[in-house]
Image: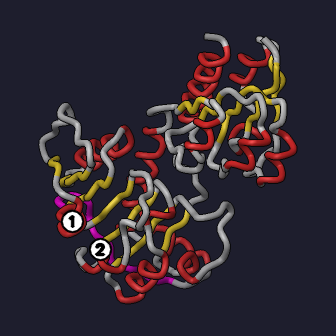
Amino acid sequence: MSGKIAVTPRSLSGAGHPALSLLTERGYEIVFPAPGKTPSEDDLLRALPGCVGWLAGVEPIGPRVLAAAEGLRVISRNGVGVDNIDLPAAEARGVRIEKALGANARGVAELAVTLMLSAFRHVPWSDARLRGGDWQRRIGIEAEGRVLGVVGCGAIGRQVADLALGLGMQVVGYDPFPSNTFRREGFRYAPLAEVLAVADAVTLHCPPAERAILNADSLATMRHGVTVINTARAELVDDAAMLAALDSGQVSVLATDVFHTEPPAPSALLAHDRVILTPHAGGFTEESVERATRTAIENILKVLEP
């Protein structure tokens, strides 16, 4: 076979990956629209014409880009989120959408728990103060005996639940399609309102909806001093409401790995000293990148070479 395949995830376009040779060995030409960074729409408009496949990241993929990608047969995500893709426009052009289901679940789950524990013990805040010569402490809390609310109990959410149970936490999960096979001592499903109301910490592992899940109304129902972890999508949180909740102490710490734009624009929320930031690194582990890359490539070949 022959043709061009665009590769846009930053984890691959900057340093490459040995698995990409699975494509070049079959005669495909690899195209990097924006090596080492998230491509702009102009980058994509220049690079995509003539591409038959696209190993895509989280960059927006709208009608204009899809119209320019004449001949494109498949968009293969190196993750599970496809809310960045205009799915009706892709379907109208006959472009298949593939996901790397479960490939980065462990990496994201471990980061979510890392962020939770860092928030419980104020690790980034303490590190920053001590490096500045300021000897201060904020009293923390222990995970054992606390309640973790998991919003979205797919592959990632279930692994978060297992890790939290191992720490001695109680876990309450919400999912519109709860699994009948995921049964653990210390875990139960509950309606979203109950999950938010009873949890000492809430971690988000679901796609965005029309309205932010954590808004002024829902934040007011949560336990005072709750910790919020977001490794899913920035749109799940109302920024203004979250800033007010941090200022009032309703939310003790927000730990987020996701942003509206990457890199994010400066804001009062992101500058808050009770916010922990990581640069969309949930799936950025050696193991997750390996699994996600190989799965995404296999999905491309499945479509192009059935």
Q: How far across and down, in percent of the image, does residue 37 sit?
A: 76, 51
In the drawing, does residue 152 fall left or right of residue 90?
Answer: left
Residue indicated by mark 2 = 218
Q: Is residue 153 visible?
A: yes
In the drawing, does residue 181 fall left or right of residue 41?
Answer: left
For residue 272, above or below residue 191: below
Residue 57 lies in magenta, yes or no?
no
Residues drawn in magenta: 135-146
Q: Identify which residue is drawn at 54% across, 38% down.
A: 79
Q: Identify which residue is drawn at 26% across, 64% down.
A: 142
The extreme left residue here reads 185
Label 1 or label 2, whichever comes before in sequence order: 1
The quarter of the picture where the N terminus appears is top right
Kind of residue indicated by mark 2: Ser
Q: How far across and down, in percent of the image, does residue 228 sit?
A: 37, 67
Residue 137 lies in magenta, yes or no?
yes
Helix, strand or loop at mark 1: helix
Neighbor class of circle 1 (other Cα within 10 Å; few <14, some 14-19, many 20+) is few
Residue 271 sits in quarter: bottom right
Whether the residues at callouts 1 and 2 have beta carbons within 8 Å, the answer is: yes
Kind of residue indicated by mark 1: Ala
Looking at the image, how many numbered discs can be counted on the residues? Answer: 2
In the drawing, does residue 252 fall left or right of residue 258?
Answer: left
Q: Identify which residue is drawn at 68% across, 48% down.
A: 63
Residue indicated by mark 1 = 193
Neighbor class of circle 2 (other Cα within 10 Å; few <14, some 14-19, many 20+) is some
The extreme right residue here reads 46
